[in-house]
Image (cartoon, rainbow, N blue to C red):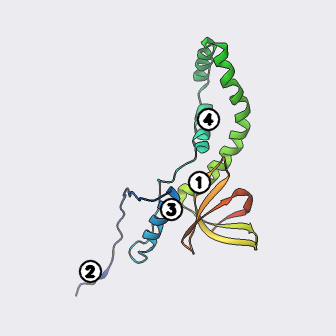
Amino acid sequence: MDNNNNNETGFLFNVDILVKSKSNALALQSLIELINGHHGEIVDYRIKSGIELGEIIEASLAAKRKSMLTPSLKSKAADNQGQASSKEQAVPASPSKSLPVRDTKGSQINDWVQSYITSNRLVRLVIEGAKGRVNIPCRILNYVADTEMLSVYHVDEKQVYTYKLSEIVDILDV
């Protein structure tokens, strides 16, 4: 007998999967449960996309891209604004003065949380609840900056939970 026939080899596939559900979080939960149901067959997985990003995150990323313009492009943009009417100049001026402080802090939080989401890293949340502090091993699925809501997948219970940032005491790498 040849022992090579008994050796199993792993194969890597890139797939797009469409899951029907009432919400993105429920669809993601169904997908994760489906994948986790095949313990011996699926050794590891990484969900790279499909998680809906909030509008605030997209706006922060756009603001960051805009701030990274080269000085020559900024001067051209300033020349173009100088040719616009004074009414049109007044409208963009007020948001640009108030947003940078918020965007800087918000984008730092968004970038930090987004790094956990994209790496699909296992973390332990320490949450202050009615019954005291609770430790939850989970993966961060989504973060909505305007409501400060964090959706996580509890790896032990195989459930998706949503928490406000004010409830979370600490996020620890596992």
Q: Secondary structure at mark 2?
A: helix
Q: CA distance from mark 4 to mark 1?
A: 18 Å
Q: Nearer the viewer, mark 4 or mark 1?
A: 4
Q: State which tag comes first along the sequence, 3 or 4.
A: 3
Query: Quadrant location of residue 121?
Result: bottom right
Q: State which tag comes first along the sequence, 4 or 1.
A: 4
Q: CA distance from mark 2 to mark 4?
A: 56 Å
Q: Secondary structure at mark 4?
A: helix
Q: State which tag comes first along the sequence, 2 or 1.
A: 2
Q: CA distance from mark 3 to mark 1?
A: 22 Å
The quarter of the image holding the C terminus is bottom right
Front residue of 78 and 128: 128
Q: Secondary structure at mark 3?
A: helix
Q: State which tag comes first along the sequence, 2 or 4.
A: 2
Tell me the residue that label 2 is attached to: 5
Q: Can you give x and y, in whole percent of width and height, for residue 8 in the image?
A: 33, 76
Which label number is shown at residue 115?
1
Q: CA distance from mark 2 to mark 1?
A: 41 Å
Q: Amino acid at mark 2?
A: Asn
Which label number is shown at residue 63?
4
Within 10 Å of disc 3 (Cα), the crowding (few <14, some 14-19, many 20+) is some
Q: State which tag comes first along the sequence, 3 or 1.
A: 3
Where is 12 relative to 1, above or below? above
Q: Are marks 2 and 4 in contact (CB under 8 Å)?
A: no
Which label number is shown at residue 26?
3
